[in-house]
Every structure is written in structure tokens, then in C-alpha cells.
Image (tube, helix red, strand yellow):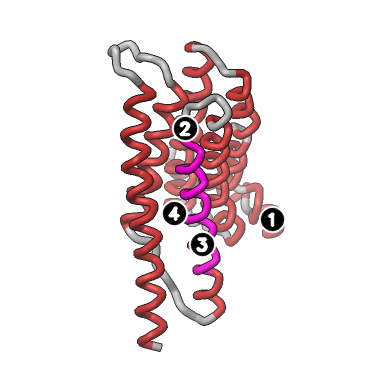
Amino acid sequence: MSHFLKNSFEKMTASKGKSEVFNLPNSITLLRLAVIPVLFLLLLSPGRILSMVIAVLFIIASITDLIDGYVARKYNIVTTMGKFLDPVADKLVVTTAMIMMIPIDRIPAWIVAVIIMRDLLVDGLRSIASAEGLVIDASRLGKQKTLCQIIAVSALLIHYDTVFSLDAHAVGIVVLYLALALTLWSGADYFMKFYKQKIRK
């Protein structure tokens, strides 16, 4: 089965021009982006059932991030386009979900603003570091931050009490504050790493 999959992936990437975009990992990433229009249904102030449907789609989209990364590494289909698309898709899906929940009072606007500003600052820092020949590796804090954001957003999308009588919104808010703390901490960590490398250089 593994041999069959590998041959299939090799055929899919036979054409260099097309392989940069239309290989399997990148196709999965593009499918993840397809969840974004669904998130606009949040503007309709969805009830219990629709909220659960949106949350499930968001969770599935988040899981595909693990799948496309695994496939890309296992079958050596890592491309420049994939390296660009994957983190962009993650941020777009999570950020869009948070923004869409602001008008229906499921998430504090100021927290969303802080998270977005942190991401913009870190992205800008990485661009400056790259231009100066510095490499700032992703830290475990960044991965923990992303995981907490996904859990928080998932719970806030569900919003209502679950079958286990848990208040999904309350759980989401608690995890969101943890995600906020990790977001600021990881952001500060990036700047500290950049500063240390600048001194050494």
C-alpha cells in the first residue's frame, strides 16, 4: 500500500511546474482554506446545531494541518510553495474564525487585536532576520500557542453546553486567555532570539 501511495505521489509531482502547487500536501492545504467561507455563517448568529457544524469543520481543517505536513515529510514532497501556504492557511483559518466571532460577542475584540498584532510583528521580524542572514527557529512555545488557539476557537465556535453539560463558551474563554499568554510569551521569545543573534553577529 505504501509503495502504491509513493508511486501515486511521484506521478502527481512528475511535472515540476505543477508539483509546486498541485501536489497532495498542497492540495490538502488549499482544501483547508475552503473552510474560510463557511466561517462567515457565524455572522448569522448560528444556533446550537449550526454552531456545532461550523466547529466540526474547523476542527477537521485544523487536523488536516497535521496530515499535509506528515505526507510532505514522509514522501519527500516538501516544496517552497508548501512552506509558504501551510503557515498562511493556518493563520487565515484561525484568525478568520476569531474575527467572525467578534460581532456575535463570542470573543473579546481586544484579544483578537493583540494576537493579530503579535503575528504581524513576528512575521516582520522574521523578514528582517532573513534579510540579514539570521535564522530564527520556531520554538515549542509557538506550537503550544497554536494548539491552545485551536482548542479555544473550537470551544468558542461550539459555544453552547455540550453533551457532557460543559459550558463550551466558558471553557473556550479560559483556554483563550492561556493562548493569549503563550502568544505574548512566544512573541517575546522570538524578539529575544533575534536580539541575541544580532549581538553575536
Q: Which of the marked residues, 3 or 1, is nearer the chain's N terminus? A: 1
How much space separates mark 3 and mark 4, taking CA atoms? 29 Å
Q: x%, y% of residue 50?
A: 54, 15
Q: Which of the marked residues, 3 or 4, is nearer the chain's N terminus? A: 4
Q: Quadrant of the C terminus?
A: bottom left
Q: x%, y% of residue 113?
A: 52, 46
Per the image, the residue denoted by label 2 is 107
Element under disc 1: loop
Residue drawn where x is 50% and y is 75% of the image: 129
Element under disc 3: helix
Q: Amino acid at mark 3?
A: Leu
Q: Which of the marked residues, 2 or 4, is nearer the chain's N terminus? A: 4
Element under disc 4: helix
Crowd tier of the residue under label 4, counting other residues whose Cα lies within 10 Å: few below 14, some 14–19, many 20 or above: few
How much space separates mark 1 and mark 4, taking CA atoms? 19 Å
Residue drawn where x is 48% and y is 12% of the image: 48
Query: Any mark on residue 15, and which?
Result: 1
Q: Which of the marked residues, 1 or 4, is nearer the chain's N terminus? A: 1
Crowd tier of the residue under label 2, counting other residues whose Cα lies within 10 Å: few below 14, some 14–19, many 20 or above: many
Q: Amino acid at mark 4?
A: Arg
Question: Is 157 placed left or right of 177 in the picture?
Answer: right
Q: Which of the marked residues, 1 or 2, is nearer the chain's N terminus? A: 1
Query: Any mark on residue 73, and which?
Result: 4
